[in-house]
Amino acid sequence: MFGKKKFNDNSIEYLIVGLGNPDKKYENTRHNAGYLAVDYIAEELGVKINRVKFKSIVGEAKLGSHRVLLVKPATYMNNSGQAVVDAMKFYKIQPENVIILLDDINLDVGKMRIRLKGSDGGQNGMKNIIYLSGSDQFPRIKIGIGKKPHPDYDLAAWVLSRFGSDEQKELETVKKNCLDAVGLILDGKADRAMNLYN
């Protein structure tokens, strides 16, 4: 579906995709943990994510020896696959070279989990990416956003709530670890990343 890539010096080799919702009102919410991680990566690499392309806001960067496109889908979470598949087709990139950063309600804040493939885990953005691409072979970094405070708490209200100040500090460490983990995955050291951060 995505063709075969012919590399040249300016080729994008990898997509680093942070999932979230684009409106101002969603800034710094739990569901935007993927956006926050990709913003951190951009900042550390000294690049801006400010071009509109592939139904996303994107920025090109060099991470180690790899040319990457940092991607924040602007389709809203549930249609993330539209943006991701558009970029994959354009650059002829296989799912194995698309790293997804996303929120996970089953992990505590301050925790992260790296998976190289698998199901969507109930996360709607991931579900749409798998559905529209026809593949579940996406490496992903799940960022813990914490469980609902009690079982009756509305799930949508919880994921669209903001992190507390203590949680923000934990999140800073996770964002740094996400950058390190992405670098290791790009260098073919995914096992090391999983040993360090899972």
Image: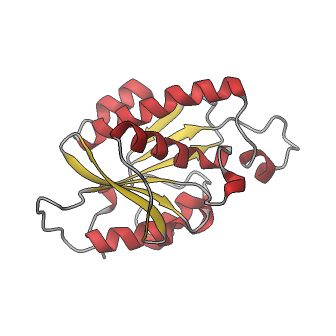
Q: Is residue 34 above or below residue 192?
A: below
Front residue of this view, candidates 165 and 48:
48
Judge left or right: residue 107 versus residue 8.
right
Could you tell me residue 53's position as x and y percent?
A: 42, 70
Could you tell me residue 13's position as x and y percent?
A: 23, 57
Judge left or right: residue 96 versus residue 176.
left
Residue 130: in sight, yes or no? no
Q: Quadrant of the N terminus?
A: bottom left
Identity of the residue drawn at 18% across and 68% down: 5
Could you tell me residue 127's position as x and y percent?
A: 55, 62
Could you tell me residue 41's position as x and y percent?
A: 41, 41
Residue 61: in sight, yes or no? yes
Q: Quadrant of the C terminus?
A: top left
Colour mapping used in the image: secondary structure
Q: Is residue 99 above or below residue 183?
A: below
Judge left or right: residue 7 versus residue 122.
left
- Quadrant in which residue 196 is drawn: top left
* Numbered disc total: 0
Identity of the residue drawn at 29% across and 53% down: 68
- Quadrant in which residue 137 is drawn: bottom left
Front residue of this view, candidates 137 and 101:
101
Judge left or right: residue 122 versus residue 196.
right
Q: Is residue 51 above or below residue 34?
A: below
- Quadrant in which residue 181 is drawn: top left
